[in-house]
Amino acid sequence: MSKLRGLWRLIRLVLHLLHGLWTMRRYFPDWPQARRDLAVQQWSQALLRIAGLQLQVKGLPVQRAPVLLVCNHISWLDIAVLHAAAHCRFISKDDVRNWPLMGALATGAGTLYISRASRRDALRVVHDMAQALAQGDVLAFFPEGTTSDGSTVLPFHSNLFQAAIAADAPVQPLGLRFEDANSAAISFVPCYVGEESLLQSVWRTLCAAPLRAVLSFGPAQTAQGRDRRHFAAALREEVLRLSASA
C-alpha cells in the first residue's frame, strides 16, 4: 500500500510541478508582484498537500518588510514549507538552479543564488541581499549551509547576516520540525542528509503515512551593535529553541 500511495503522489507531484512551471512562463510576466507572490504561496500549499503533509504555523511572521527569515534546514520540502507559510525570496546554493523542474520553479519565484565555493560570490550576494532589504523585500535562507536530521541545529555560517546589518533590517528566526500527523512524534522521514540522493528522499516521503510540518516564528531581532558572528550565534540559539518546541 505504501508503494501505491507513493506512486499516486508522485504522479500528482510531477503534474503539479509541470503546471507550476507553465503558470510561471505563461502568466508571471504580466502579473503584478503581489499576485505572483500569492500564486507561489498557494502553489506551495498545494504541493505539501499532494506530498501528504499538513502545515501547522505557530507565531506570526513580521507584518512589515523588510525582514530576513532564518530557519533550520532538514528536507527538500523546507522551501515549500516556508513559501506556504509566508511570502519570501530565498537565497540558495547555486546547484538548486539545476534541479529538475524545481530549479526552474525556484528561479521563477525570485531565488537569489550563491556559489559557496567562491568568497567573491558571497560578497556579491551580501550586496544584492542588502539592496533587496533596503527596497523592502522579504528574504530567507538556511544559515547551516546544509541539511541535518533535525535533532539539532548545526553552527550558523555568519557571512550573509552582514546584509541585514548593512540594511539595518530585522532578522526573524524560525524553527522547523516534522512530525507523524497521527502520533505527533518527531519524524525523520522527510530528511535529506548524507549520501542519500534527492530522489531517495522524495520517494520515502511520498510513500509515508501522513506527516505534519510544524513551523514556529520567533520574535524578530536586530543586530544592536553585534557583529555578524555574535548576531548569528544568538539567532542560532533561538532557532534551536523554536525547533525543539515547535
Image (cartoon, helix red, strand yellow):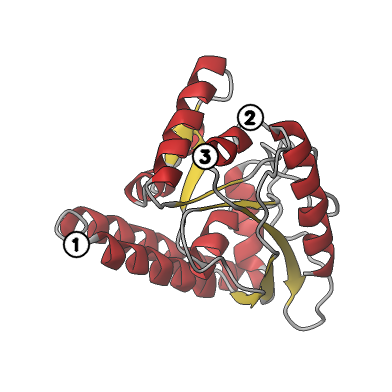
| Quadrant location of the N terminus in the rendered image | bottom right
Give above or below for 85 relative to 22.
below
Q: Residues within 10 Å of mark 1 (few under 14, many from 20)?
A: few
Give above or below for 199 relative to 194.
below
Q: Amino acid at mark 1?
A: Trp
Q: Amino acid at mark 2?
A: Asn
Residue 157 in view (yes/no): no
- Can you tell which of label 3 and label 2 is closer to the viewer? 2
Looking at the image, which is closer to me, 45 or 53? Answer: 45
Which callout, 3 or 2, points at the residue further toward the start of the chain? 3
Q: Residue furthest left?
A: 30
- Is there CB contact under 8 Å for labels 3 and 1? no
Quarter of the rendering containing residue 21: bottom left
Relative side of 154 to 13, left or right: right
Q: Residue at x 24, y 58 (%)?
A: 22
Measured from the top left, where is residue 85 in percent x and y? Answer: 53, 69
Q: Residues within 10 Å of mark 2 (few under 14, many from 20)?
A: some
Label 3 sits on residue: 92
Measured from the top left, where is residue 195 in percent x and y? Answer: 72, 35
Q: Residue at x 71, y 38 (%)?
A: 225
Q: Residues within 10 Å of mark 3 (few under 14, many from 20)?
A: many
Label 2 sits on residue: 159
Residue 184 in view (yes/no): yes
Q: Residue at x 38, y 59 (%)?
A: 17
Label 1 sits on residue: 31
Q: Rounded to the nearest whole Å, what is the CA distance between mark 2 and mark 1? A: 34 Å
